[in-house]
Amino acid sequence: MNSPALTTRNGGVKPYIGKVVLAYSGGLDTSVIIPWLKDNYDCEVIAYAADVGQPDDLSGVEAKALASGATRAHVYDLKDEFIRDYVFPTLRAGAIYERKYLLGTSIARPLIAKYQVEVARIEQAGAVAHGCTGKGNDQVRFELTFMSLAPDLKIIAPWRTWDIRSREDALDYAAAHNIPVTATARKIYSLDGNLWHLSHEGGVIEDPWEEPPGDAYGLTVSPEEAPDEAEYVTIGFEQGWPVMVDGLRLDPVPIVKQLNELAGKHGVGRITLLENRLVGMKSRGVYETPGGTILMTAHRELEHLTLDKMTMRAKDTLALQYADLVYNGQWFTPLKGALDAFVDKTQGPVTGDVRLKLYKGACEAVGMKSPHSLYDEALATFGEDDVYQQSDAEGFIRLFGLGQKVANIRDRNAQQSEVER
């Protein structure tokens, strides 16, 4: 039976919830949300943090959550599942958002939200909460996952309802509630990171005319400062899954870590993107995906070697839709499952090795081989061969061009008739 509603300081009545599971990072915003939830609801706050390889130090996150007023804290290490079940399937799909973005932030959100639901079930909570702003895409990604996996849970999004409007407001609120924070009022960039990528937004980056400054990068050196000698790396795939680096079989997380270090050293994986957000506005950000750039380049080139033309064209078309689904937070949808089945079918022959050259920010595939190669040197050679009968091309061209020949004859006859009239 629910307990009676409690009265707030201003005389209002706090809605009873019982328990709220908050997606907690340990940063200023989510630390402030803990007391805010308790000020505005009759509830316990359960903090939940997910380790997907972000640059934040999570070693003290549990103690920090408890010091901020949480009843309990759960910390999940999701790095293996993140790369294996979320990043690599997106890589196999060839999903790139708006020509550049390898979807680093987008891919992580459904996984984080999935385990937030699991914590809510363990704790028998009635609600989940997040610290996403009302201007961003992440609020959609979290909430679509909640709606898919736990439609019965109440969703609380403080940024859409509270009076805190600035970093200074949040710091004042933290001080008033004795919340331990290390943040200051000065914050140049908004950062998001995980094993797959690092992004920077805000500050001078918001001006489309300005070149992003050097401090807008954290995983890669500038191409100008990269080594003056090229370096080569070979990536091995089995059915579209990355499995080897330079002939050494590795698990997914070590693959990404090793390639992040290698590509970062050579300034590979930087983009600046003026993107169309799901919520309707354009935003500009700096994204670094060093190891991902190597893997995406290698996978694409291996598909050129092993996929037939029609399959590759169909896959390229659906990759755009796949990227939109991931970007929009529609991971747990029937269409996404159907596209995964299509991708899985296409990846059967995508086995082999790709050798890449890294130099001054560039990543170029320079060699590839596969036991399922569709490249036949006997057919492609300009030298003498006994396979391709060049005389056959005459009949093919005649039939291939018949339609346009007939149409052009018709148009010339019509023009001639017009002149004669």
Image (cartoon, rainbow, N blue to C red):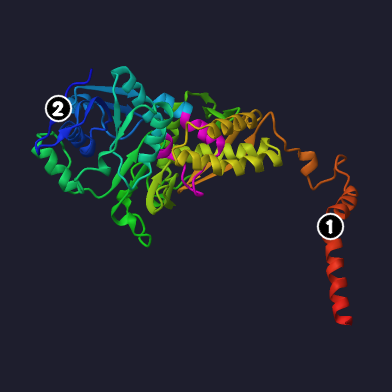
Density class for disc 2 (Cα within 10 Å; few <14, some 14-19, many ≥20) is: some
Residue at 55% across, 42% down: 321
Name the quarter where the N terminus is drawn. Answer: top left
Q: Is residue 101 within the magenta segment?
A: yes
Is residue 255 visible from the viewing direction of this image?
no
- Determine which of the numbered discs, if any, sits on residue 403 in the image: 1
Name the quarter where the C terminus is drawn. Answer: bottom right
Q: Position of residue 416 (x, y in %)?
A: 87, 76
Q: Nearer the viewer, residue 145 or 56?
A: 145
Q: Is residue 204 above or below residue 318?
A: below
Residue at 39% across, 54% down: 281
Q: CA distance from mark 1 to mark 2?
A: 76 Å
Q: Nearer the viewer, residue 271 or 30?
A: 30
Drawn side of residue 384 relative to residue 246, left or right: right
Q: Quadrant of residue 298?
A: top right
Q: Earlier in the sequence, mark 1 or mark 2?
A: 2
Density class for disc 1 (Cα within 10 Å; few <14, some 14-19, many ≥20) is: few
Q: Nearer the viewer, residue 67 or 244?
A: 67
User: What residue sits right under mark 2 in the picture?
Assistant: 67
Q: Which residues are magenta?
A: 86-107
Instruction: Look at label 1 and name its amino acid.
Output: Gly
